[in-house]
């Protein structure tokens, strides 16, 4: 079954340590040479046509930051149709789940969720021939995909086409993560700041199958991304809750503190706002538009 099986941890290093403790010795041959440049691909695929533009910008920033750090990053088209892989993997999951969990349909309806019941029903409608054909198709796609990137350390791809949906009815659109589950490699989800509506954005940093111990390289890539210098007009960070005051003379409060919120703006080094560069709401007040207030 293609559901994710592996090690989880509070930190990526924890998951890698667990893998390292049980992995066969021969997998050490998959490790990269320490100290060499990382070789990164920003994958392009037709499925990205439906991706939110702000999410795509963040992945682009990541690739450029890696290049700026002395590593190699390039764009490359996917050698396999990711939409096809997602659909095929979905059928395989439905078929296998229906054979494993068929007995759940005999339970009272309030004991099994409607989505799970629907998945089992879809799987029972699939033939064994379809299942075997799909498994063969995915095996071939996996081989074709990874042969196309023999020297690559990691591949960058959005974690989801859109930001998280409202409510708890769904965890989001799985179209982007599904193909990577089928491809079988190590995956780290890298936080990429927030959208303009302040909801989080994530990016997949994906390694080849069997390179789990080498996920240390994914940690290094993630750390490199976290150290990206945020310039004034760089939307890496979420729009701050800091706003300018106009006119400052009519406001009352302690010197150097911003009281009233207005237009969103970017951030610069904290040296303009006074009193630790903080607004009364706790936000950083360090943009030139944040005028000092006389006590």
Image: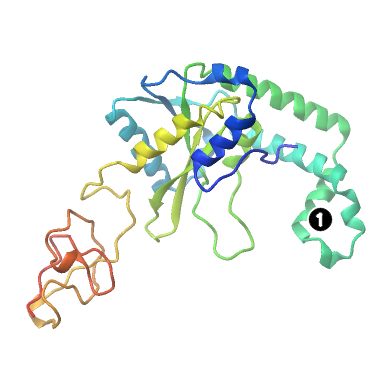
The residue tagged with tag 1: helix, strand or loop?
helix
- Above or below, 170 against 260 in this view is above
In the rendered image, the quadrant that contains the N terminus is top right
Report the front residue among 10 and 165: 10
- Please state the horizontal and vertical placement of residue 120, each as a whole percent of the image: 82, 49
- Above or below, 114 against 173 in this view is below
- Please state the horizontal and vertical placement of residue 195, each as a whole percent of the image: 40, 55
Residue at 62% x, 30% y is 183
- Please state the horizontal and vertical placement of residue 168, each as a whole percent of the image: 61, 64
Q: Please name the residue that numbered disc 1 is placed on.
A: 117
**Which of the 4 image quarters holds residue 21?**
top right
In the image, is 113 to the left or to the right of 170?
A: right
In the image, is 43 to the left or to the right of 174?
A: left
Tell me if I can see residue 43 in this picture: no
Residue at 29% x, 25% y is 70
Total labels: the figure holds: 1
Task: Sort mark 1 into few (<14), some (14-19) or many (20+) by Cα contacts within 10 Å.
Answer: some
- Please state the horizontal and vertical placement of residue 252, each as a whole percent of the image: 13, 83
Tell me if I can see residue 267 in this picture: yes
Report the front residue among 62 and 256: 256
- Above or below, 195 against 139 in this view is below
**Which of the 4 image quarters holds residue 179?**
top right
Report the front residue among 270 and 146: 270
Report the coloring of the rendering: rainbow
**Which of the 4 image quarters holds residue 139?**
top right
In the rendered image, the quadrant that contains the C terminus is bottom left
């Amino acid at each position: 079954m293609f559901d994710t099986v592996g090690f989880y941890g509070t930190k990526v290093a924890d998951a890698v340590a667990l893998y390292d403790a049980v992995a066969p010795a021969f997998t050490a041959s998959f490790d990269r040479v320490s100290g060499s440049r990382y070789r990164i691909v920003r994958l392009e695929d037709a499925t990205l046509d439906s991706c939110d533009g702000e999410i795509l910008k963040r992945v682009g920033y990541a690739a450029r930051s890696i290049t700026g750090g002395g590593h190699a990053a390039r764009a490359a088209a996917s050698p396999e149709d990711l939409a096809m892989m997602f659909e095929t993997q979905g059928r395989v999951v439905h078929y296998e789940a229906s054979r494993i969990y068929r007995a759940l349909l005999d339970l009272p309806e309030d004991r099994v969720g409607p989505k799970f019941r629907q998945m089992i029903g879809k799987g029972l409608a699939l033939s064994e021939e379809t299942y075997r054909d799909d498994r063969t198709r995915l095996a071939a796609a996996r081989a074709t995909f990874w042969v196309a990137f023999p020297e690559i350390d990691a591949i960058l791809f959005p974690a989801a086409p859109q930001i998280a949906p409202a409510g708890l009815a769904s965890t989001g659109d799985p179209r982007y993560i599904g193909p990577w589950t089928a491809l079988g490699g190590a995956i780290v989800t890298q936080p990429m700041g927030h959208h303009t509506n302040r909801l989080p954005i994530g990016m997949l940093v994906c390694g080849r199958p069997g390179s789990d111990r080498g996920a240390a390289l994914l940690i290094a890539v993630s750390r490199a991304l976290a150290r990206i210098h945020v310039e004034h007009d760089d939307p890496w960070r979420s729009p701050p809750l800091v706003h300018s005051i106009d006119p400052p003379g009519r406001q009352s409060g302690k010197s150097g503190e911003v009281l009233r919120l207005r237009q969103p703006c970017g951030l610069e080094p904290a040296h303009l706002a006074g009193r630790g560069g903080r607004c009364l709401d706790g936000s950083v007040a360090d943009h030139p538009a944040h005028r000092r207030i006389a006590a």
